[in-house]
Image: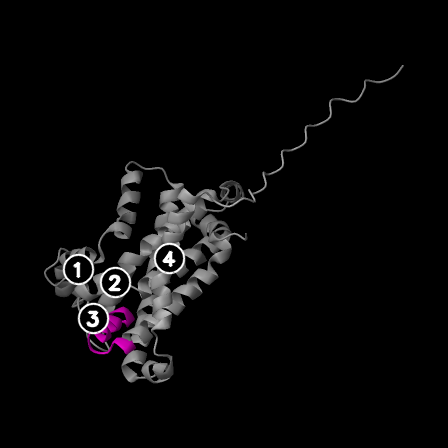
Amino acid sequence: MTGPGPGPAPRPRPRPRPRTPGGAPLPLLVPALLGLAFLVLPLVALLLRAPWSSMPELLTSAEVWQALRLSLVCATAATALSLVVGVPLAWLLARVEFPGRGLVRALVTLPLVLPPVVGGVALLMALGRNGVVGRWLDDWFGVTLPFTTAGVVVAEAFVAMPFLVIAVEGTLRAADPRYEEAAATLGAGRFTAFRRVTLPLVAPGIAAGAVLAWARALGEFGATITFAGNFPGRTQTMPLSVYLALQRDPEAAIALSLVLLAVSVAVLAGLRDRWMTSA
């Protein structure tokens, strides 16, 4: 007696469709090339007009190094502040259900679309000497934030932290929560599971968000000049120095712009594995 015959053969998986070897349609190709030129041409013009022969002299001046040092210190401090409060905020938005979570997420992302100058005015109304909270900081602790280096850090953190929160929240939502549940069944508390399981799991997203926040803080202008002013050695960061140099020494402004452009390219290169795929 023979056994049952073999079942039906499994269907082959559909292969991905190859890319069309033909050229793009003209109605799409022309605006695509115009858009590419619109984005690339200003950067090319910056490189072409750069005073390469006098670049070492321009970049080694005391004012440039002072502004660069202040920018690096303040951007790093703003990123650290964003990490301390932004990662728990991202975890709250990704893991905890509570009324009004959508509204909270909208408020968190509002600085992304808010004009930076408006953000600076809002910071003055909140943390200025006569602000809603600033008056208490001044009376109780003698802390004054506007027009100080600490004010630069606060202004940069205000505009940069949403980038970190969005990146970390997206990573948390993509992470499998069963690892945290398994840690809880083994007796780990909520904070222990967050520290021992969740943080290592989402570390790449935290790193990417921190790099984005740092780059955004380094290039911040509007909120900084509105809330912290423009005092050399105290609040004058690289973008503010570029703005002033453009009025009195355009070549110096170009040189400073190239420094910020190089930082932006380095950030993009560091994140290429996360957002860019090979052709």
Measure the alpha-carbon separation of dots 1 and 4.
Answer: 43 Å
The region drawn magenta spans 235-252
Give the residue at mark 3: 148
Q: What residue type is labelled 4?
A: Ala
Measure the alpha-carbon separation of dots 2 and 3.
Answer: 10 Å
Give the residue at mark 4: 37
Q: Is residue 67 left or right of residue 22?
A: left
- At label 3, counting other C-alpha atoms closer than 10 Å, the crowd grade (few under 14, some 14-19, many 20 or more) is some
Please tell me whether mark 1 sits on a helix, a strand or a loop.
helix
Q: What residue type is labelled 1?
A: Leu
Are the two marked residues, 1 and 2, in contact with CB atoms closer than 8 angstroms?
A: yes
Q: Is residue 190 visible?
A: no
Q: Is residue 279 magenta?
A: no
- In the rendered structure, which disc, 4 or 3, sits on the residue that comes first in sequence? 4
Q: Which amino acid does label 2 sit on?
A: Val
Give the residue at mark 2: 154
> Please, which colouring scheme is shown?
one colour
